[in-house]
Image (cartoon, rainbow, N blue to C red):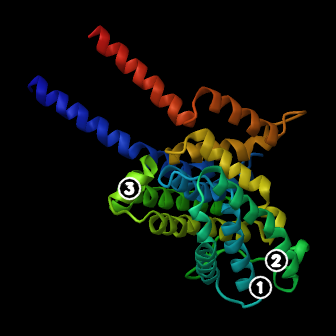
Amino acid sequence: MSEVSYASQRIRAATIASRYWQPAVLTVFALAGAPLLAGTDVFPLLVLAGIYAIAVIGVSIFAGLGGQLTLGHTVFMAMGAYASAISALAWKLPPIAGVLIGVVWALLLAVITSPILRLRGWYLVMATIALVLMLPQLAANLGDVTGGSDGLYGIPDFGILGLEVQGESAYFVLAWLLVLVFFLLARNVRGSRFGRALAAIGMDPDAAAAAGIGLFRVKAVLWLLVCVPAAVAGSMFAHYSSFIAPTDFNFSVALTLFAAVIIGGERSIFLGIVVVVFLVTMPAYASGPFTVELIEALALIAVYLASPSGIAGIISATAGRRRARRERHA
């Protein structure tokens, strides 16, 4: 075998490995995590981390492709959760119908709130914070439907086609398989023509507009897309916990999703998932003055000082320096 052929095969193998190792890790974790970790103190938190990771994928797409940050995804989670709860308790509909209704409600809310996308940067972040702060008041005012501050309880387990998801192990597998599905869909969006249009907007909005790309239209479509995984995550949370209240979707939860994306890196969906697992499972290990909120704040400061692009930026910069050193010594 010639050196050129051998080198081309190595490059092809490296390309395949770089493309598929992340989905492979998620698949193995989804299928092997339950038998290995079930019964441990951290296992219920890993189920919750999987549910949050579904929503983090939407936040990561919005930041990485749209170049915008949001703290409002918990509102879309609330749409999915309340839709599933109300559909099951009041309307006696099957769980899958509640999930679909939650997605529709989230899409309607995304359409109603889409004018805020005319804002940029931290102005948009502040607008999405307002959405999160409005949620408890709205839930209280609609107490006859939402249960108010007391919430809704007795939500049945999720099920589809006569198969019920019961127990933490089953919810673990379901949540992490949904993470895998949305992760693959997000990667396809990134490589699509729509994703390239978003990348052009992120690099230079004025140049993209001059090239004929409708900035608001493209961002509005992205806003609609990223609300879907959040709504599904909310539905899964409702069925898993069997109880929901406005405090389940408060600013603290929004900050956790936001911090996961910022620490992991806006352009790395996989690292955002890894970081949200770390943040959600911290209560099992945090003690004394080191609360979860303090750890989130310290991690944000430390990573941002090292690289505004998060852990992904640190890894990329380190790999670039090593590559440069090899080229100099070659």
Task: Name the residue tied to disc 2.
Answer: 154
Q: Viewed as shown, does residue 9 lie left or right of 36?
A: left
Distance between the alpha carbons at the discs numbered 3 and 2 = 50 Å
Q: Where is residue 27 in the image (x, y as percent from the top left)?
A: 48, 52
Q: Where is residue 118 in the image (x, y as percent from the top left)?
A: 57, 63
Distance between the alpha carbons at the discs numbered 2 and 1 = 8 Å
Q: Which amino acid does label 3 sit on?
A: Ala
x 59%, y 43%: residue: 274
Q: Which mark is residue 155?
A: none
Circles 3 and 2 in contact, beta carbons < 8 Å: no
Lower position in the chain sequence, tag 3 or tag 1:
1
Lower position in the chain sequence, tag 2 or tag 1:
1
Task: Give the SS element for disc 1.
Answer: helix
Task: Name the residue tied to disc 3.
Answer: 208
Circles 2 and 1 in contact, beta carbons < 8 Å: yes
x 42%, y 56%: residue: 198
**Quadrant containing the C terminus in the rendered view:** top left
Q: Quadrant of residue 323?
A: top left
Q: Note whether 260 is above or below 66 in the view shown.
A: above
Q: Viewed as shown, does residue 202 lie left or right of 257?
A: left
Q: Residues within 10 Å of mark 3 (few under 14, many from 20)?
A: some
Residue 37 in sight: no
Distance between the alpha carbons at the discs numbered 3 and 1 = 48 Å
Viewer-closest of 288 and 148: 148
Task: Give the SS element for disc 3.
Answer: helix
Task: Name the residue tied to disc 1.
Answer: 89
Q: Quadrant of residue 271?
A: top right
Q: Which amino acid does label 2 sit on?
A: Gly
Task: Give the SS element for disc 2.
Answer: loop
Q: Viewed as shown, does residue 213 lie left or right of 166?
A: left
Q: Which amino acid does label 1 sit on?
A: Leu
